[in-house]
Each structure stands twice: as structure tokens, then as C-alpha cells.
Image: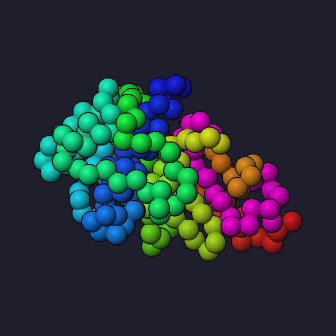
Amino acid sequence: MADLRETRLSLHALAELLLAGPQFAQSKSIELRATKGGFGTVEAPDVRVVRTSLHFDGAVMRLTGRTIAEVAREAGIRPRPLDDIYSGGCGLTVDHPLTVGETAAAELAEAFRRGDEALATFAPDAHRVLWPEHFDIGITVDEVNYGVSPGDSYLDVPYAYVGPWEPGKFSDSFWNAPFGSARPLLEIGDVAAYFAEGAALTRRSPT
């Protein structure tokens, strides 16, 4: 579990400082997306994290055992924190030493892949975003948030969630988290069906 937490934290820091931050500086967007084997920017510069490496401008940089600053120098990317855009986030600096385990990185990449696929199936017209602040991929439909997190302080493993804007209105057993509902991905066979179940419950009259 330590490897998963450390890998998630390192990738979260990269998402903020070397992907979303530089993208915001150049293209005024912090939105990221799920990509094959990891995640990447949606606007220039085109930067991607694929498992245990950073891909930029035709070059591939290894991550583990180096600081974010060292990777940034090799890539020729100027890191940019997002503290002025939102509060929260990973809270790390460019001096953070990266630990990205192969198995853990593959598990997190698979979580984003499953989330992206399920969201596209559940609500194909909704705009899917991998947000750097909480490092989750999600959408909002009819004042309900749906998405997949690679894990966080609430649940330390990848999980899917359904979060009504007013979670206190619902009392069905489906709602098992302070923000609505959360289920570890390992316990869900069909993530899109889980989202659909949540959507159906939110359309009922609150009890």
C-alpha cells in the first residue's frame, strides 16, 4: 500500500507542476485527460505521463529517484504551481523526490482508463476532465458529480464515486460516504452501471 500511496502522490505532483501548471501558463487551461498508460494535457504543451516516465517533445524521461525539478530541467519544462488557481492540491514542491512504482503506476493508469471508459458510456455527451486539484477524473450531470479517484485521504485505494451537490438529502444504503457514495474499483464489475444506479437514486424523491 505504501508503494501505491507514494506513487499516487508523485504522479499527483507531476500532474500539477509539470502538466496542468505549464499548460495553464501557455494555454490557460488546467484540465487534463486520461491517456494510454496514464494521463496528459489537453492543450499545449503536449506532456504525458506513461507509467513510470514523462513524455515530452519526443523525449522520454524516467521519474523514480529524481526530483520534479530534475525531470523538469531535462525535459525543458518550466514548473508552475497552481496555488493561485485553487486551494488544496498535493502540497508538494519541485524538490519532491519522485517514487513511481511500475505496478502501482499500472494500477492507477488502469483506474483512470476504467473511469474514462465508464463515464463515456454513462454520459457520452458530458465533458470528462481529469482535475489536477484532487487528481480524479469526473463529470457533472444534473448537479451530481460522477468519477473515479486513484485514492485519497478518504479511501486509500482507487474508487468510483457519486456525489450529489446536496448529499444530505438522500438516505438509501447506496450513500455510504460523507459526500455521497464511494466504492473501491476492485468491488465494482460495471462502473457505468454503478453511476447509473446513483443517477436513478438521485432522481427519486429524497427520503
Image location of residue 144, percent across then percent down: 63, 67
Instruction: Quarter of the image for the C terminus: give it.
Output: bottom right
Q: Residue at x 56, y 68 (%)?
A: 140
Q: How many marks?
A: 0
Tell me if residue 6 comes above or below residue 35 in the rendering.
Answer: above
Image location of residue 177, percent across then percent down: 73, 49
Is any atom of residue 131 visible in this view? no
Q: Is residue 166 magenta?
A: yes
Q: Is residue 71 magenta?
A: no
Tell me if residue 142 comes above or below residue 19 in the rendering.
Answer: below
Tell me if residue 13 comes above or below residue 143 in the rendering.
Answer: above
Query: Which residue is outermost to the left?
Result: 58
Q: Residue at x 62, y 40 (%)?
A: 153
Q: Is 21 left or right of 59, judged from the image as shown?
A: right
Tell me if residue 56 comes above or below residue 74 in the rendering.
Answer: below
The residue lying toward the viewer, choosing from 61 and 73, is: 73
The residue lying toward the viewer, choosing from 47 and 91, is: 91
Is any atom of residue 127 visible in this view? yes
Q: Is 137 left or right of 99, judged from the image as shown?
A: right
Q: Residue at x 26, y 36 (%)?
A: 70
Q: Residue at x 63, y 57 (%)?
A: 162
Which colour scheme appears in the figure? Answer: rainbow
Query: Which residue is outermost to the right?
Result: 207
Image location of residue 8, percent across then percent down: 46, 37
Which residues lie in the magenta part? 155-175
The residue lying toward the viewer, choosing from 118 and 97, is: 97
Q: Looking at the rendering, which quadrant does residue 158 occupy?
A: top right
The residue lying toward the viewer, choosing from 8 and 122, is: 8
Instruction: Quarter of the image for the N terminus: give it.
Output: top right
Image location of residue 93, percent across then percent down: 42, 42
